[in-house]
Amino acid sequence: MLVIGELINGMFARVGRAIEKKDAAAVRRIASEQAVCGAGALDINCGPGSLSPADDMKWLVETVAAAVDKLLVLDSGKEEVLEAGLQAAGRPCLLNSATAEPNKLKRLLDLAAGYKSGLIVLTVGSSGMPQGCSQRIESAARIVEICVETGFPLDNIYLDPVLMPVSVAQAQVGAALETIKEFKVISPELKSVVGLSNVSQSAPHRRLLNRVFLSMAAAYGLDAAILDPTDRELMETLSAADILLNRNIYCESFLKKCGGDKDGPG
């Protein structure tokens, strides 16, 4: 599973301060820490408090790219901010995120294609947040149709089933899991991604909920997750899920990664 580190986001106080002060060393530390902890990609978001989001995105991208050689996930609702990040990166990235709304989706597909980049697309249509698996699949089918029309490769698309907090929409968690499985029915080339922390928003025991959902989603075929890679128990859960789902070979290196066999023999 592709782990996308979520910590370079202006909504976090330390990142917001770093952006304001242009503290490159602080951003590099956060980027490097996530990479060391197992992130294969890093989400970059200036946050809602940015007064110059295009300039801030450019600075963040340049700072992170100088620190780690990882896939950069440019996260903004503004096309000009995404393009500023793409220009600064000088290499393919992943854009986060579009919706199934046709006009905006086509514009973002054109932008991503121009920079040979991928795109995360939420299964959200014009009617708003999806209810149940069927609405999510309808949006996914519409997204695929537009990609085919525009010639955008489906293997550069990550579909987000839209995780809703278990505290307010408990039934929707199961619907999101079923949708992840159904994406591959539409096309085996499609990839799936979730923003993991959404499932536990405003709930107690957030880290436990995140761990359990991640292992469940892995069993349903999840390809990528935006999460906190410095959460050791979360990353250990993912490693264990990969073993139990026969995606990695069970070996001593797995035990070392998880801090050894603390349960003893038997």
Image: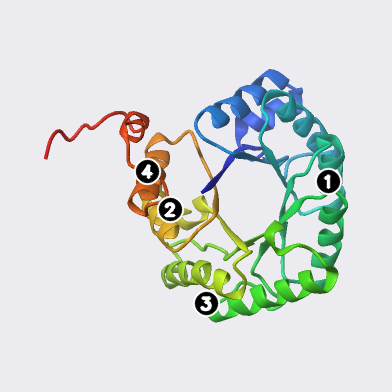
- Would residue 2 be seen by someone viewing this image from the given angle? yes
Q: CA distance from mark 2 to mark 3?
A: 18 Å
Query: Which of pointers 2 and 4 lies earlier in the amino acid sequence?
Result: 2
Please tell me whether mark 4 or mark 3 is closer to you in this view: 4
Q: Is residue 235 above or below residue 23?
A: below
Query: Which of pointers 2 and 3 lies earlier in the amino acid sequence?
Result: 3
Query: Which of pointers 4 and 3 lies earlier in the amino acid sequence?
Result: 3
Query: Which residue type does callout 4 highlight?
Result: Ile
Query: Which residue type does callout 1 highlight?
Result: Val
Q: CA distance from mark 3 to mark 1?
A: 32 Å
Q: CA distance from mark 2 to mark 1?
A: 30 Å
Residue carrying label 3? 133
Give the secondary structure at mark 2.
helix
Residue carrying label 1? 81
Query: Which of pointers 3 and 1 lies earlier in the amino acid sequence?
Result: 1
Q: CA distance from mark 4 to mark 3?
A: 33 Å
* Residue occupying the point 39% across, 59% down: 216
Give the secondary structure at mark 3.
helix
Query: Which of pointers 2 and 1 lies earlier in the amino acid sequence?
Result: 1
Give the secondary structure at mark 4.
loop
